Image (tube, rainbow, N blue to C red):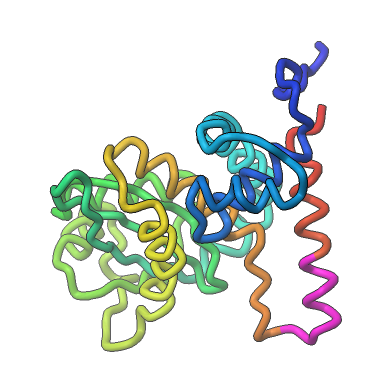
Amino acid sequence: MTKHSPFRYFKTSPEIIRLAVMLYVRYPLSLRNVVDLLHEQGIDISHETVRFWWNRFGPMFAAEIRRNRAIRMRAHSNWQWHLDEVFVKINGGTHYLWRAVDHEGEVLESYVTKRRDRKAALKFLRKSMKRYGNPEIIVTDKLRSYGAAMKVIGNADRQETGRWVNNRAENSHLPFRRRERAMLRFRQMRSLQKFVSVHASVQNHFNQERHLYSRINFKLNRAAALAEWRQLLNA
């Protein structure tokens, strides 16, 4: 069966579409900021075009990134997880963004709920474990919803809590907070869930942990990540 290119009905080249989506999702830029940057390169489009491209191709790019990294992440991400939730305002109402991060700083799962009770924590844990397996250690804060959910699953003996032990999960919220300010927050729970899923995959793809590598190796890893991005969704 012939695999059709998802870009086949678009007049704009796939390279420009990939570049626009990467700029918008990876960096804390608004839609109009992306348009201005592309205009500097001689590419004249509107901000609504960038919005359409990211909504259309962002989830596709994220899915292919996850598929390419699935084997490695499943093999190495089940040692230690860090779980945390952060408040997010949507049309004046408080929602909660749950995030699971492994010991290497990879964002495993992002999940948006209206509450942060045992039911929400249980659904978040089951969703994460279904994709990545059962971790050996689960580091959380002292929110009682985690303990109640882990008793249901049978992971209560694997939970660890303590002061400063969950800094990795806390730090994982910082890139999202920068994006949230640039986007002037979110208006729908569904759009928030869609964006954080795409943003987490792109963040994982380009996260080179610069402080752990020499300058030479960092440049090689960065070039490899960019080359792989340019090949996404090639037919």
Q: Position of residue 216 (x, y in %)?
A: 86, 81
Answer with left or right where residue 221 lies relative to residue 45: right
Image-based side of 191 in relation to 150, left or right? right
For residue 216: magenta? Answer: yes
Does the magenta stretch mainly form a helix, a strand or a loop?
Answer: helix
The image shows residue 105, relative to residue 211, as above or below, that is above
For the record, the magenta segment spans: 213-222
Q: Provide residue 5's location: percent of width, then percent of height.
A: 76, 22
Number of marks: 0
Closer-to-camera residue (215/117): 215
Quarter of the image for residue 8 reads top right
Q: Which residue is at a point 45% across and 57% down the rendered structure image?
A: 134
Q: Is residue 112 above or below residue 80?
A: above
Q: Is residue 146 magenta?
A: no
Q: Residue at x 66, y 40 (%)?
A: 64
- Classify residue 182 by image quadrant: bottom left
Query: 1 or 181, which lies in front?
Result: 181
Q: Is residue 3 above or below residue 189?
A: above
- Residue 28 in view, yes or no: yes
Does residue 59 show up?
Answer: no
Q: Residue placed farthest to the top in the image?
A: 1
Quarter of the image for residue 156 reads: bottom left
Q: Residue at x 65, y 53 (%)?
A: 37
Work out which quarter of the rendered image holds the N terminus and state it.
top right
Which quadrant is home to the C terminus?
top right
